[in-house]
Image (cartoon, rainbow, N blue to C red):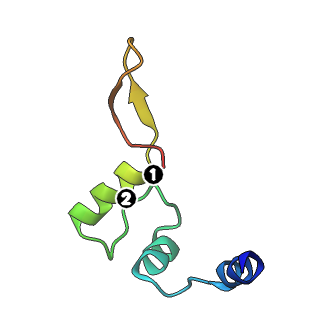
């Protein structure tokens, strides 16, 4: 079962999702995607952006570094 599942996961290819279209047009993950709304671009940056930590080691801002 594990082998079948791993082969299936490796076979999944994404090439025409909204993200893929935006990524191709923008040229970089960190640039705003023209086909995303402002809220979607903000969420993308929150997901991809590196976190910023304060002196106590607590996250002060930035992204989540996913």
Residue 29 at x, y percent in the picture: 49, 60
Residue closer to the observer: 48 or 30: 48
Residue 56 at x, y percent in the picture: 38, 12
Snapshot quadrant of residue 35: bottom left
| Label 2 Cα crowd, 10 Å radius (few <14 / some 14-19 / many 20+) | some
Residue contact between numbered discs 2 and 1, judged by CB atoms under 8 Å: yes
Which structural element holds mark 2? helix
Looking at the rendered structure, the number of numbered marks drawn on it comes to 2
Residue at horizontal 36 percent and vertical 37 percent from the top: 62
Q: Check residue 44 in the rendering and tell me which mark sits there, or answer none.
A: 2
Q: Check residue 64 in the rendering and tell me which mark sits there, or answer none.
A: none
Residue 43 at x, y percent in the picture: 31, 57
Residue at horizontal 62 percent and vertical 84 percent from the top: 13
**Which quarter shows the N terminus?**
bottom right
Which structural element holds mark 1? helix
Residue, disc 1: 48
Q: Eyeballing the image, is 43 above or below 64?
A: below
Residue at horizontal 77 percent and vertical 78 percent from the top: 3
- Residue located farthest toward the top when viewing the structure as drawn: 55
Residue at horizontal 39 percent and vertical 11 percent from the top: 55
Q: On the picture, is 24 further left or further right than 8?
A: left
Q: Eyeballing the image, is 4 above or below 61?
A: below
Q: On the picture, is 52 further left or further right than 29?
A: left
| Label 1 Cα crowd, 10 Å radius (few <14 / some 14-19 / many 20+) | some
Residue closer to the observer: 36 or 64: 64
Kindly report the distance in space between the C-alpha atoms of the residues bearing marks 2 and 1. 6 Å
Q: Eyeballing the image, is 5 above or below 38?
A: below
Residue 47 at x, y percent in the picture: 40, 53
């Amino acid at each position: 079962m594990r082998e079948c599942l791993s082969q299936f996961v490796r076979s999944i290819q994404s090439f025409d999702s909204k993200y893929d279209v935006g990524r191709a047009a923008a040229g970089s993950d960190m640039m705003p995607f023209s086909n995303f709304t402002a809220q979607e671009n903000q969420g993308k940056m929150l997901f991809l952006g590196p976190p910023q930590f304060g002196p106590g080691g607590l996250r002060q801002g930035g992204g989540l570094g996913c």
